[in-house]
Each structure stands twice: as structure tokens, then as C-alpha cells.
Image: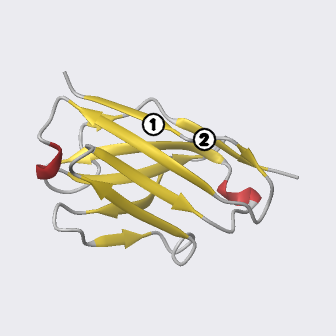
Amino acid sequence: QVQLVESGGDLVQPGGSLRLSCAVSGILFSSYNMGWYRQAPGKQREFVAGITIGGIRKYADSVRGRFTISRSNLKKTAYLEMNDLTPEDTAVYYCNVARTSLPGDYWGQGTQVTVSS
């Protein structure tokens, strides 16, 4: 079956950096678009970043210039490099895969990112 396993979440101070990973199995990874979403307490899940099978990237306005999404088809893993983190970035971060438009049907379990001094 399809599995997405996120990792890398942590408690970090404002201005800090984290790198999230999403290991994918059960699908032909190179044929899927990948996305990262997040959900803060009391808020709806929101799009953060996406990368197509061709490597085209898209970002939410709130993270553009600070976050970078990438993928390794060899490792079947997607990454989210997060820099200059602020408390507003505190959320559970989820990865997602889709054959066409994001979001697709498959989600990971999420990884917690907390930005606090």
C-alpha cells in the first residue's frame, strides 16, 4: 500500500532552520507530484509548497524565499528546507502525493514543527 512517512520536525528557536523529509513507498514516485501542507492549531490545513514530476516548484506567499522544496526520485523522498522560521510557522507538516493536481489522496501522518524561544 501507499505510505508516506514524514520526519525532521522539532522545536526550534525563531530564525532557526529545519529540514523535513517525506519517504514514500508503494507508488512509482517519479510519476507523482509532491506537496507539503501544514495545519496549525485551530486552523485549516494549508498548502505550503509543491514540486511537479518535472521539477517545477510552487510556494505559498507566506513561505516564499524562506522554504525550498526538493525531491530525490532515486531515494523516493521529498524534502522541505525551512529557513528563518517564525512562530507563525508552528504547525503539523504533512506531505502529499498526486498523479495530477495537488492535493492527492495520500497523506503522511505529519511531523510537528514548533518555533518558540
Residue drawn at the location 35% of the way across and 50% of the way down: 78
Q: Quadrant of the N terminus?
A: top left
Q: Are marks 2 and 1 in contact (CB under 8 Å)?
A: yes
Q: Residue at x 54, y 52 (%)?
A: 19
Q: Amino acid at mark 1?
A: Glu
Measure the C-alpha gap from mark 2 to mark 1.
8 Å
State the image quarter where residue 95 is shown. Answer: top left
In the rendered image, the residue lying farthest to the top is: 1
- Disc 2 marks which amino acid? Gly
Say left or right for 98 vs 71.
left
- From the top left corner, tell me how far across and down residue 4 is, in percent: 33, 33
Residue 9 lies in quadrant = top right
Percent x, y for residue 46? 48, 54
Can you tell which mark lies on residue 9?
2
Tell me the residue that label 1 is attached to: 6
In the picture as drawn, the residue positioned furthest to the bottom comes out as 65
